[in-house]
Image (cartoon, rainbow, N blue to C red):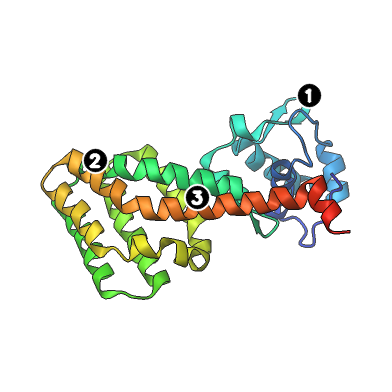
Amino acid sequence: MAFQPIEHRSVPGDVFEQIVEGVLSGELPAGQNLPSERELAKVLGVSRPAVREAMKRVAAAGLVTIRQGGGTTVRDVRRFGGLDLLPKLLIRGGELDVAVARSVVEARAHIGPKVAELAALRADEDQIAVARAAAAQLVELSDPVAQQLAALDFWDAIVDGADSIAFRLMYNTMRSAYEPALPALASALSGEVGNAGGYCRIVDAIADRNAGAAARAAAVLLEPGTTALLSAFGEMEKLLQEALSPEGEDGDH
């Protein structure tokens, strides 16, 4: 990987972003040793303390191993990376990574029903009231992006009711990855976020403490959006494969 000088000097965040981008793109492959702190500071045009601070952050993200006196080695992202990397993996070089997007949709389809099930067992009355208010708001909305935002508020309340720190952190990461793409997803998710009754049925099941009914209602609600998104991503992958195939290249001549 050809490192580029940092425009804003002594900013660890800039150094961090450049190294993370190199690791995630594969330009800095797993097992590769990074240049020394001194060498990186010289190449990037920043101070050594900036590089040191950045490398601590990269190590904390699980992307490198720093050995005292033994250099810094890039780690395998798939084995050691955390959920915080998901937004960076989803958008690569300004483009949507279709495979990552597909995995997010698949995870969403499985997590939603489980979270609703747990909320039926654990949610308090205040959390149920917040979820009911979000569902009621969906009845009044017609703008697709506004509907998606209201739906996110709904699921935020359901996740709170599930009282699971693991699902909360997963949801936080998935939401941060999802929100920038709201306008692009409006069409595919219109059948889901426009189904205000589906959200109300989830809340009703949770309020009745019927975990099975809550899970089923969530699965039914999420199914149209899941199907539409997976179909769209499948078509995108097919087009990408055709464009990259030798036959596709020959067809351009």
Front tag of 2 and 1: 2
Q: Amino acid at mark 1?
A: Gly
- State the image coordinates of residue 232 (x, y, percent, origin top left): 54, 55
Q: Which label belongs to residue 117?
A: 2
As rendered, which of 238 and 132 lies closer to the eye?
238
Front tag of 3 and 2: 3
Quadrant into which the C terminus falls: bottom right
Tell me if 186 is positioned left or right of 241 in this view. left
Sequence-first tag of 2 and 1: 1
To which quarter of the image does residue 199 belong? bottom left
Q: Amino acid at mark 2?
A: Glu
- State the image coordinates of residue 207 (x, y, percent, origin top left): 13, 50
- State the image coordinates of residue 187 (x, y, percent, origin top left): 46, 66
Q: Which label belongs to residue 230?
A: 3
Q: Amino acid at mark 3?
A: Leu
Q: Are marks 3 and 2 in contact (CB under 8 Å)?
A: no
Separation of marks 2 and 1 at Cα, in angstroms: 49 Å
